[in-house]
C-alpha cells in the first residue's frame, strides 16, 4: 500500500531519528544499518510506541537486552548524580519516546492530527505475535556503537488505503532543546 | 517549598531536569503525570514555574495546564512545556491556556537556564 519511494522515506526517517535520539556524546559514533528481518533485530525486551494518523498507523519498537554497553551509553550523563536510580529500561523508554517523537514531528509537518502514544515496555516474547497488528510494512535497523551492537529498532506501517509520504526539505521551525517563548 | 515543579511520566526526564535545576541553585519538586502535578500545585502555593511534558497517562500536560488555570484558579504560575511534540495546533492550545514557552526534547539545560531563572524570579 506504499510505494518504494515512500518506504525509503520512512527508512530514512527511522535511521535519522535513531541517531538523533542517542545521548549527544554518542551520536557521532553510532553506526546505523537497515536489516531485512525482525529476527535480526529482536531482543529479550522491547519498548513500543504508536503514532495514529488518518492515513496510517505506525508502531515504533526499540529492541534491547541488558548488556553493559547500554549502561555505558544510556547511563547517568557526565555530572549527573551517579546515585540517580533511574533504571536503564526507563532511559530506553525515553529514547524510544525521542525516536517516535522525531518521526511524529516530521509526519505532522505534512499531515494534521497525528497522535502519539506513551512508551510501553514489552517482553521480547510478544514479538512472536507481531503479525496480529496486521501492519503491511516492516522496516528494521540495528544501532551499533564502537563496533558493538547496541540495540535494534523496527518501524511498522499499517494503512487502510494506499498513501504516499515525503519528508519536507525545508528545516523545521524549532530545533530540539531550544526554548521558544510565546 | 519548591520553586519549580517538573512533571513527566519518565523518571529519566524528571531526574535529568530536576538534577540540573538543583545544581543551578533552584529548589525542585517532581510529579509523575498531570494528576500528580495538580495535586503538587494544590499542596505548594510557592511553586513559580512548572516544566511539563505533554503526552502522559492519567491527565496529559495540556489538560493539566487548562485545569491549573480554571480549577486551581492559578493564573500566575509560569508554565513551560517540555515535549517531543511541536504541532502548531498543540502549541496554540498551550498558548491559549497561558503556557509561556515550549521546548522540544531533549532538554538543553545550559541553553534554557537563564530564561528559567528569570521566570522563577531569581535572575
Image: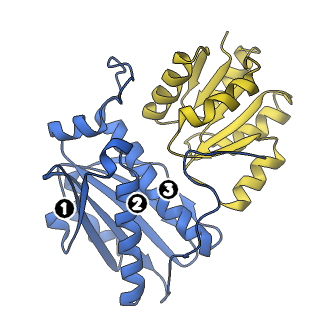
Label 3 CA crowd tier, 10 Å (few <14, some 14–19, many 20+): many
Q: Position of residue B30 (x, y in %)?
A: 56, 23
Q: Which mark is residue A41?
A: 1
Q: Find residue A85 and report its horizontal and vertical position in percent.
A: 34, 22
Are marks 1 and 3 in one subunit?
A: yes
- Name the side, left or right, on which B116 lies relative to A149: right
Residue in the picture at 42% in, 56% down:
A99
Chain B drawn colour: yellow
Image check: A182 left or right of A171? right
Q: Are marks 1 and 2 in contact (CB under 8 Å)?
A: no
In the picture of the structure, the residue carrying the numbered disc 3 is A101
Q: Which chain is blue?
A: A
Q: CA distance from mark 1 to mark 2?
A: 17 Å
Question: Depth-wise, is mark 2 or mark 3 nearer the camera?
Answer: 2
Between discs 2 and 3, the one toward the N terminus: 2
Dot 3 lies on which element?
A: helix
Task: Identify the residue under disc 2.
Answer: A17
Q: Chain of mark 2?
A: A
Earlier along the polypeptide chain: callout 1 or callout 2? 2
> How packed is label 2: few (under 14 Cα within 10 Å), some, or many (20 or more)?
some
In the picture, residue B69 is in which quadrant? Answer: top right
Q: CA distance from mark 1 to mark 3?
A: 21 Å
Quarter holding residue A132: bottom left
Q: Chain of mark 1?
A: A
Would you place residue B68 above or below residue A94 in this image? above
How many residues crowd mark 1 within 10 Å: few (<14), some (14–19), many (20+)?
many
Amino acid at each position: 500500500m506504499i510505494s518504494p519511494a515512500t518506504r525509503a522515506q520512512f527508512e530514512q526517517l527511522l535511521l535519522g531519528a535513531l541517531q538523533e535520539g542517542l545521548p549527544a556524546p554518542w551520536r557521532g559514533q553510532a553506526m546505523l544499518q537497515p536489516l531485512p528481518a525482525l529476527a535480526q533485530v529482536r531482543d529479550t525486551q522491547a519498548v513500543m510506541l504508536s503514532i495514529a494518523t488518518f492515513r496510517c498507523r505506525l508502531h515504533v519498537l526499540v529492541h534491547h537486552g541488558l548488556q553493559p554497553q547500554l549502561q555505558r551509553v544510556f547511563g547517568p550523563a557526565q555530572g549527573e548524580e551517579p546515585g540517580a536510580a533511574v533504571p536503564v529500561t526507563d532511559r530506553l523508554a525515553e529514547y524510544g519516546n525521542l525516536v517516535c517523537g522525531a518521526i511524529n514531528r516530521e509526519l505532522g509537518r505534512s499531515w494534521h492530527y497525528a497522535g502519539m502514544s506513551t512508551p510501553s515496555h514489552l517482553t521480547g516474547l510478544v514479538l512472536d505475535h507481531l503479525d496480529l497488528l496486521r501492519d503491511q510494512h516492516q522496516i528494521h535497523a540495528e544501532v551499533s556503537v564502537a563496533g558493538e551492537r547496541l540495540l535494534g529498532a523496527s518501524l511498522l506501517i499499517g494503512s487502510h488505503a494506499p498513501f504516499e509520504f515525503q519528508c519536507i526539505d525545508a528545516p523545521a521551525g524549532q530545533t530540539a532543546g531550544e526554548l521558544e517563548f510565546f | 517549598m519548591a520553586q519549580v515543579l517538573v512533571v513527566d511520566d519518565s523518571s529519566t526526564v524528571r531526574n535529568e531536569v530536576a538534577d540540573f535545576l538543583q545544581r543551578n541553585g533552584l529548589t525542585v519538586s517532581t510529579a509523575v503525570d498531570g494528576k500528580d502535578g495538580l495535586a503538587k500545585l494544590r499542596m505548594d502555593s510557592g511553586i513559580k514555574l512548572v516544566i511539563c511534558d505533554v503526552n502522559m497517562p492519567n491527565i496529559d500536560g495540556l489538560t493539566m495546564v487548562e485545569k491549573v488555570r480554571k480549577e486551581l484558579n492559578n493564573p500566575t504560575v509560569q508554565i513551560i512545556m517540555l515535549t517531543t511534540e511541536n504541532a502548531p495546533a498543540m502549541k496554540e492550545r498551550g498558548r491559549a491556556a497561558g503556557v509561556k514557552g515550549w521546548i522540544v526534547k531533549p532538554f538543553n539545560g545550559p541553553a534554557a537556564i537563564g530564561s528559567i531563572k528569570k521566570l522563577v524570579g531569581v535572575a
